[in-house]
Image: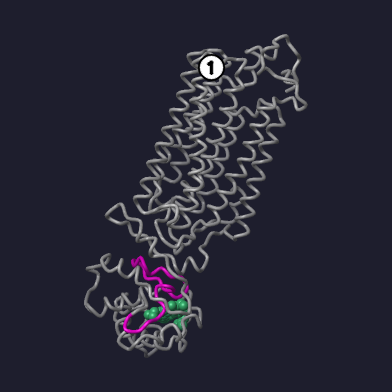
């Protein structure tokens, strides 16, 4: 990718702080740091997912997943989060095009869709609590709420970030030269989306129908290469 | 030239590609949903492979296009995939360490788990927690919590034997009548009875009829009484989970004759 001059030939755009700077890796430091952070966040979520899987099907009392998990509703909120990722790429594209109106619109749209997702989660958590599942009810509650709760916290942080960017955009400070500001928020946002892709599959589509320990949950060990 | 917007943009997919990816992600999610839509498919082992593969495809589409790793410095791809692989390895190591590749419940969980009954009040949540059992330990634990919950759950279910059958049911669940024994539900399953989901002893769903066939010349009633009084005396062959020696006199010796009569009446009803 060196031909895209990330290694930086000083081009006389000196004040363009965000234009590529000269770095040993050829990658902007902030962007590199963002990716290192996301990489480490994989480990964070990896261990929470591992905890869920280790205790899967070991709860002594209900509610068990099959008693309360509502896959259709969560499929809808998954769609919403996917839409928000699309809105995010549009925001970045608008920034590169220097289309001020669109930058603001798509940033706000992304945050809005993220907020709807969180709304679904708040609704779900409350419903679960009403049906008797709290974080201290059983192993399922403990691992489920910890994992999805931390994901929700990530989304919430992302919303705050996006709204902050929206206000920066209103001052007209976002544009091609500051595109990295939007790009970084975007990377974070998409990451939160892919974490949800994994959670949705493991906790809802696969684990959502788990019964209590008395009924055997069968996993064919041969498919575990994929997990 | 690097800060020229057009040049910069060429490192990102076009709008058309973005829309295409969005549609693709939608469709894949829809397919995933359709896979688990038929009731018979839900939670089936074979659904795991397609679901995991489909979501891995979605995952890749997002990181390579939305996060444009495909168009960025290769180093970023390695940094991210490195962390991802490490996270994956940690997950697999933990799961392997705890032996949950085949997450059959550990025997303690299997023997002690209580089925969940939705509460009508809708705001509860305390009963379930309270029902957490103590280990099946030698100390013959009486378990009053489920008993009090259960009585109302199956009110009209007592036919002929009436009071005696009900008493037997209660002893079967709690292990407590006049005397005390380890709760039978710890080890025995009776289908349709949410409390009786133990997996250590034989399934007693049809013991009322089967008991008469176990030993030539021994009636169902006698066989059941004998099974409770002298569990070691006879171990039927060819029954699942009929582990010799697991059900011992130590478990049942605390029961009085009246308790055994009630249990027998109850078990004879399980046809």
Whether residue B46 is visible here, answered yes or no, is: yes
Please identify the residue farthest to the right as the structure is shown.
A24
Q: Is residue A9 above or below residue A85?
A: above
Residue at the spot of label 1: A94
Front one among A107 and B65: A107
Q: Is residue A90 above or below residue B39?
A: above
Q: Which quadrant of the structure image shows residue B266?
A: bottom left
**Residue A28 horizontal/vertical position (percent):** 69, 25
User: Residue A162 vs residue B181: left or right?
Assistant: right
Q: Is B194 contained in the magenta span?
A: yes
Whether residue B236 is visible here, answered yes or no, is: no
Which SS does the magenta portion mostly show?
loop
Q: Quadrant of the N terminus of chain A?
A: top right
Chain hosting mark 1? A
- Per the rendered image, the range of residues in magenta is B177-202
Q: Is residue B172 above or below residue B219?
A: above
Front one among A209 and B137: B137
Q: Is B43 contained in the magenta span?
A: no
């Amino acid at each position: 990718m060196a031909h895209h001059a990330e290694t930086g030939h000083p081009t006389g755009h000196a004040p363009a702080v965000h234009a590529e700077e000269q770095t040993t890796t050829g990658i902007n430091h902030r962007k590199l740091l963002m990716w290192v952070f996301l990489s480490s966040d994989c480990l964070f979520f990896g261990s929470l997912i591992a905890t869920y899987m280790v205790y899967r099907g070991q709860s002594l009392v209900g509610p068990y997943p099959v008693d309360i998990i509502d896959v259709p509703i969560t499929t809808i909120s998954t769609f919403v989060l996917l839409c928000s990722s699309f809105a995010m790429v549009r925001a970045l594209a608008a920034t590169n095009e220097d289309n001020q109106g669109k930058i603001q619109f798509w940033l706000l749209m992304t945050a809005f869709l993220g907020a709807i997702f969180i709304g679904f989660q708040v609704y779900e958590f409350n419903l679960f609590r009403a049906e008797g599942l709290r974080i201290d009810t059983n192993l399922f509650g403990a691992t489920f709420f910890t994992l999805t709760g931390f994901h929700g916290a990530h989304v919430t942080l992302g919303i705050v970030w996006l709204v902050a960017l929206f206000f920066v955009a209103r001052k007209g400070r976002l544009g091609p030269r500051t595109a990295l500001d939007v790009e970084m928020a975007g990377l974070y946002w998409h990451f939160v989306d892919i974490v949800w892709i994994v959670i949705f599959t493991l906790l809802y589509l696969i684990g959502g129908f788990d019964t209590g320990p008395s009924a055997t949950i069968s996993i064919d060990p041969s498919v575990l290469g994929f997990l | 030239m690097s800060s020229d917007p057009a040049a910069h943009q060429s490192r990102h997919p076009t709008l058309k590609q973005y829309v295409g990816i969005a549609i693709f992600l939608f469709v894949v999610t829809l397919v995933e949903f359709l896979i688990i839509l038929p009731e018979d498919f839900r939670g089936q082992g074979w659904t795991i492979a397609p679901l995991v593969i489909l979501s891995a495809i979605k995952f890749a589409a997002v990181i390579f296009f939305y996060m444009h790793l495909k168009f960025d410095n290769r180093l970023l791809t390695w940094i991210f995939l490195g962390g991802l692989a490490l996270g994956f390895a940690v997950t697999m190591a933990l799961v392997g360490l705890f032996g949950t590749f085949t997450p059959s419940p550990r025997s303690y969980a299997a023997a002690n788990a209580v089925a969940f009954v939705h509460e009508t009040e809708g705001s509860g949540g305390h009963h379930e927690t309270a029902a957490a059992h103590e280990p099946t330990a030698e100390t013959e634990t009486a378990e009053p919590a489920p008993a009090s919950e259960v009585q109302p759950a199956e009110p009209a279910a007592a036919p002929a034997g009436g009071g005696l059958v009900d008493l037997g049911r209660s002893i079967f669940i709690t292990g407590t009548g006049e005397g005390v024994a380890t709760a039978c539900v710890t080890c025995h399953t009776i289908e349709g009875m949410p409390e009786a989901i133990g997996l250590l002893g034989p399934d007693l769903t049809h013991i009322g009829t089967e008991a008469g066939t176990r030993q030539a010349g021994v009636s169902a009633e006698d066989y059941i009484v004998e099974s409770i009084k002298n569990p070691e005396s006879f171990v039927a062959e060819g029954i699942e989970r009929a582990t010799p020696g697991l059900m011992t006199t130590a478990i049942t010796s605390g029961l009085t004759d009246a308790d055994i009569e009630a249990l027998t009446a109850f078990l004879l009803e399980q046809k």
